[in-house]
Image: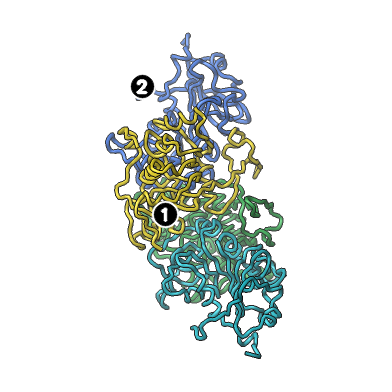
Chain colours: A green, B yellow, C blue, D cyan
Amino acid sequence: MDKTLSSPAEAVSAIPDGAKVMIGGFGGSGAPIELIHALIDRFRETGSPKALTVINNNAGNGHIGIAAMIKAGMVKKMICSFPRSSNAEAFNEKFLAGEIELELVPQGTLAERIRARGAGIPAFYTPTSFGTELAEGKPTEEFDGKMYVREQWLKADFALIKGQQGDTVGNLTYRLAGRNFNPLMAMAADKTIAQVSELGAPGTIDPEQVITPGIFVDGVVEVANPQQEEVLVRTGVVH
Amino acid sequence: MDKTLSSPAEAVSAIPDGAKVMIGGFGGSGAPIELIHALIDRFRETGSPKALTVINNNAGNGHIGIAAMIKAGMVKKMICSFPRSSNAEAFNEKFLAGEIELELVPQGTLAERIRARGAGIPAFYTPTSFGTELAEGKPTEEFDGKMYVREQWLKADFALIKGQQGDTVGNLTYRLAGRNFNPLMAMAADKTIAQVSELGAPGTIDPEQVITPGIFVDGVVEVANPQQEEVLVRTGVVH
Amino acid sequence: MAGFNIMEDKLSNAQIAWRAAQDIEDGSYVNLGIGFPEMIAKFQPEGRDVTYHTENGVLGFGKAPAEGEEDWDLINAGKKAITLNPGASFFHHADSFSMVRGGHLDLAVLGAYQIAQNGDLANWRVGSKGVPAVGGAMDLVHGAKRVAVVTDHVTKDGKPKLVETCTFPLTGVGCVTRVYTSLAVIDIEDGKFILREKLPGLSMEELQAVTGATLHIDGDVADLIVPEDLS
Amino acid sequence: MAGFNIMEDKLSNAQIAWRAAQDIEDGSYVNLGIGFPEMIAKFQPEGRDVTYHTENGVLGFGKAPAEGEEDWDLINAGKKAITLNPGASFFHHADSFSMVRGGHLDLAVLGAYQIAQNGDLANWRVGSKGVPAVGGAMDLVHGAKRVAVVTDHVTKDGKPKLVETCTFPLTGVGCVTRVYTSLAVIDIEDGKFILREKLPGLSMEELQAVTGATLHIDGDVADLIVPEDLS
């Protein structure tokens, strides 16, 4: 059951037009830049995949990563908690022009909705957003004297995530705070593709130190010295 | 913020009569035998704590651990998924005599209800138990063409858990499959007490390898060579 | 082969397990229920790469250790000592049942007291007496992509286990898709039992007589052939 | 001290942060909102052991690294580079917000556009124009045992931020229990603003005049005294 993929290009080759794609990372921490850029390159060469719904905490920064996806015109809708960054020009322009949809979700609710899909929980109650405009139209209920809003799971066709160590059966670890949404998205998507800095044989990760068990991962590609979004933004790189 | 406790006896000294107590472990794997036995010793000496509600996957085995608690008459109610074991005599006798209550919960629902309390989620929907007698009286609803049952969080006053490595601020790791319910119960109880085989200073556990962050743990006691329930049962030990 | 004796000529549990094992796909993630279903792992066909899940938080476990080599923190859901294969991982119970409930397992195989033609399963208690225990069964029947059952075709006193409607308390509703019995292999589709394979010496009439609901035919019925000597 | 000038004699953000820091209890777990609230950590009193949580999955982080020493996988919720203190830990976003929602944090401190006398908070958007962004604010206001706000007492154009009812979109309902402003320290109890401390040069009438809802007195009102020179 070797899940090794040969390149980022191969890793993203099956994502179709209109797909819902979860992309790991929080800002640049844990963002799978090489997978995103491979997807953009494919779109520039073939016109596909387009009309994507992208799920991420943010909506890109500068001229690389998700911002470059948006700029390229591949993204129909963003589902995120915080579409703001040091340079959110790509998203802002499209949004204010009405060329991209936004579903704004509180960050903890976003995380829990993703986890819920991975865990087979179609709906749950949270105190978050009760009484606010983000709860409009959602069922509410009182438990133990406090009001809660019902939220539903968030599904995706693909997840593109970034790990640190990986093995060929898909077990993953993460680097520092780069963990963030990555393990949750791995659980939630129908197909999960991980780029890892180091790819080894099964057994190279201590079973007690596996963060994402291989059952949640469909494909793994080694990207030995991955780029860091924050560094790319700060040095003005354009993809 | 040193959370070190000097002994199992001190660790369990605050548990009052009538408390709801989550006890980690799955069978003997990850079961905090020394904490349980300290609680039994206290009960034998002082008559307290009694009338406890105990939450565990099982209902004890042999004549030690939770089985010994039940035999001693400290337990009013068990909330568990599988009150059966190689020697479930202690529970069976009390149950068939009507001297102990049982709330039977499917194993995955038990885990999720505990996690839900830890995560501040008062209720969630699960497909588990739909159409069965364990779903009687619970709200049901259809999502995406499938029927689900609504379950509520499971609260507890105390959790007694077993870790492998611990540090004085309460970070924990677990040993092999001894992890099971322990990290979930740590999140869910108002007060969580952990026994660990090795207790070190903050920083002795790699931050990436912490399984239970210290925020979930109130007290930690070192038990250097903990007893294994399964071994005690097989050798016929009586506590 | 006249004189087929339902109780004597039926398959052994090992033979039923062997047959079920043949259908486990290469590269799949599988949970085998406590007891009889666990035996299936023993007959996993050569060359198939299967990863076993146990609900107490281990993926990728292997054979039982030699006696005396047990580590009782390393057990399966049946509380039996296990070993790890390369690529194994540990996780807590909520993550473990996320794998189950979230549809990440390819196959779960369970035992049964009764299976109804609509896929309902009863396998956790026989009546309202005694001490009830459910474990992970109610979770496992929902979530795995395929839920199969291994079972004797009839009860010890010869009553059908495949029935129109379960009379014992249910484990799950409409969840079973294939049943491997001591006499046949039967799929459940659209509320009907579809016979796929039966023991060669057994007539349709004989099989129907020990089945509590109509057996439907949809295409060929193959001979159910298994090795004679399985240990 | 006649001639108190609300805009000139008020506390600086650093002074408000200093005052808020004095109330952080020893041994507590604290989340400081992005921006102004983050400044509170700088003024943590000597000898108090405080563990800071950031919602992107770190507990026990320390000061910012020296310039050039940043590791951009090690950031806080404001996307600023951080360092770790001994005993730190990493976890994923669902576990991180379990800490928030599950009531495990002792204190969350946030900024505000408006605070209503019933504890409602508006701090995520001013109107319906522009690009909305909510982040973790709506989660943080529910769950932490105490939710405090640090804010200027009035808006840049002198309008009250403490009001009877918020007119901006809400972040949370009835969630704030204490407000540290540039002029006063105010608790919210039973739907009322209770004045606890005010700047010594400021009269009750002057303070009430720049507050959009009635300030109640319940026992002594202490002088709000902070160090003059904070960098």
Element assignment for label 1: loop
| Same subunit, tags 2 and 1 | no
From this viewpoint, which residue is outermost toward the left? C68
Dot 2 amino acid type: Asp
Amino acid on which disc 1 is placed = Ile
Q: Position of residue B235 (x, y in %)?
A: 30, 33
- Chain ID for label 2? C
Please state which of residues A208 and B100 is positioned toward the viewer in this rendering: B100
Q: Nearer the viewer, residue B79 or B126?
A: B79
Q: Front-most of D184 and B201?
A: D184
Q: Is residue B239 above or below residue D148?
A: above
Decide if residue C133 is in sight here: yes
The residue tagged 1 is B211
Image location of residue D177, percent across then percent down: 61, 66
Residue B204 x/y as whole percent: 33, 60
> Circle 2 sits on which residue?
C229
